[in-house]
């Protein structure tokens, strides 16, 4: 971000020098435009970093949910094997063996679906999917803000060059690119893009 602000500052300084050496009022307007684009660039970069943080937090949560799901799945498989072994014992009708089978099956059921605590395998898949969608949305927002920031950097560069070269098409190009970039940034911020 400091590099972008430095570009804007250089553009404003060029405009001041051009004005001091007999520059026209268009140079002053370009300097104002550069300042506006620099402010919009700073906001776009803040939005980009916030979206990046949101992506990372949701991605980590999603990964944790899937890892917890896999750990519970391993416990379920282990309990299934335990139940199968207990059923194959010669004294499987013994009340102690039947009690162990019942406990293992009850534990399996809770591991698979635990709406009371919200951390059964079924609930973990739902939570992981929600974090996955949120991470994808945050990543799209990050890319949107990054695109807007890149276009604003280009518009600041074109505006700065237009002051030195006094080329009106560059001024107009900088204005159009910057306006479109601000529009895209607002649409990303509003959640439309």
Image: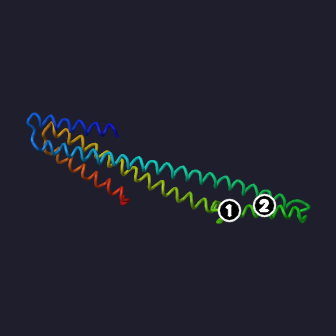
Q: Could you say which is closer to the camera, residue 57 or residue 102? A: 57
Residue 73 vs residue 188: left or right?
A: right
Disc 1 secondary structure class: helix
Q: Could you say which is closer to the camera, residue 40 or residue 183? A: 40
Residue 79 location in percent, x, y? Answer: 76, 57
N-term-proximal mark, 1 vs 2: 2
Q: Quadrant of the C terminus?
A: bottom left
Residue 18 vs residue 186: left or right?
A: left
**Label 1 packing within 10 angstroms: few (<14), some (14-19), many (20+):** many
**Figure coloring:** rainbow
Q: Look at the numbered discs 1 and 2 and tell me whether their residues touch, using CB distance below 8 Å.
A: no
The label number, if any, that marks residue 104 in the structure image: 2
Q: Could you say which is closer to the camera, residue 46 or residue 174? A: 46
Q: CA distance from mark 1 to mark 2?
A: 12 Å
Disc 2 secondary structure class: helix
| Above or below, comparing residue 70 to residue 22 in the picture | below
- Read off the residue under disc 1: 112
Residue 113 location in percent, x, y? Answer: 66, 64
Q: Quadrant of the N terminus?
A: top left
Q: Quadrant of residue 78?
A: bottom right
How many marks overall?
Answer: 2
User: Looking at this rendering, what residue extends furthest in the left direction?
Assistant: 22
Q: Could you say which is closer to the camera, residue 27 or residue 108? A: 27
Residue 63 vs residue 9: left or right?
A: right
Residue at the (20%, 49%) spot, across then down: 175
Residue 57 location in percent, x, y? Answer: 51, 50
Residue at the (68%, 62%) spot, across then down: 112
Residue 96 location in percent, x, y? Answer: 88, 62
**Label 2 packing within 10 angstroms: few (<14), some (14-19), many (20+):** some
Q: Quadrant of residue 116?
A: bottom right
Residue at the (19%, 38%) spot, across then down: 161
Residue at the (64%, 66%) spot, across then down: 115
């Amino acid at each position: 971000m400091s590099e972008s602000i430095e570009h804007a500052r250089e553009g404003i300084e060029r405009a001041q020098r051009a004005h001091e050496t007999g520059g026209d009022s268009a140079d002053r307007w370009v300097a104002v435009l550069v300042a506006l684009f620099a402010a919009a660039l700073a906001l776009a970069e803040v939005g980009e970093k916030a979206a990046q943080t949101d992506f990372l937090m949701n991605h980590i949560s999603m990964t944790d949910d899937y890892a917890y799901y896999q750990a519970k799945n391993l416990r379920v498989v282990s309990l299934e094997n335990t139940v199968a072994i207990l059923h194959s014992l010669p004294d499987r009708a013994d009340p102690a063996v039947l009690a162990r089978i019942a406990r293992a099956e009850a534990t399996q059921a809770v591991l698979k679906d635990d709406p009371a605590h919200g951390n059964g395998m079924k609930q973990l898949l739902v939570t992981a999917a929600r974090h996955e969608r949120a991470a994808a949305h945050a990543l799209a927002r990050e890319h949107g803000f990054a695109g807007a920031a890149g276009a604003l950097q280009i518009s600041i560069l074109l505006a700065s060059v237009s002051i030195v070269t006094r080329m009106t098409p560059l001024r107009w190009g900088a204005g159009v690119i910057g306006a479109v970039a601000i529009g895209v940034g607002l649409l990303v911020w509003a959640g439309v893009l």
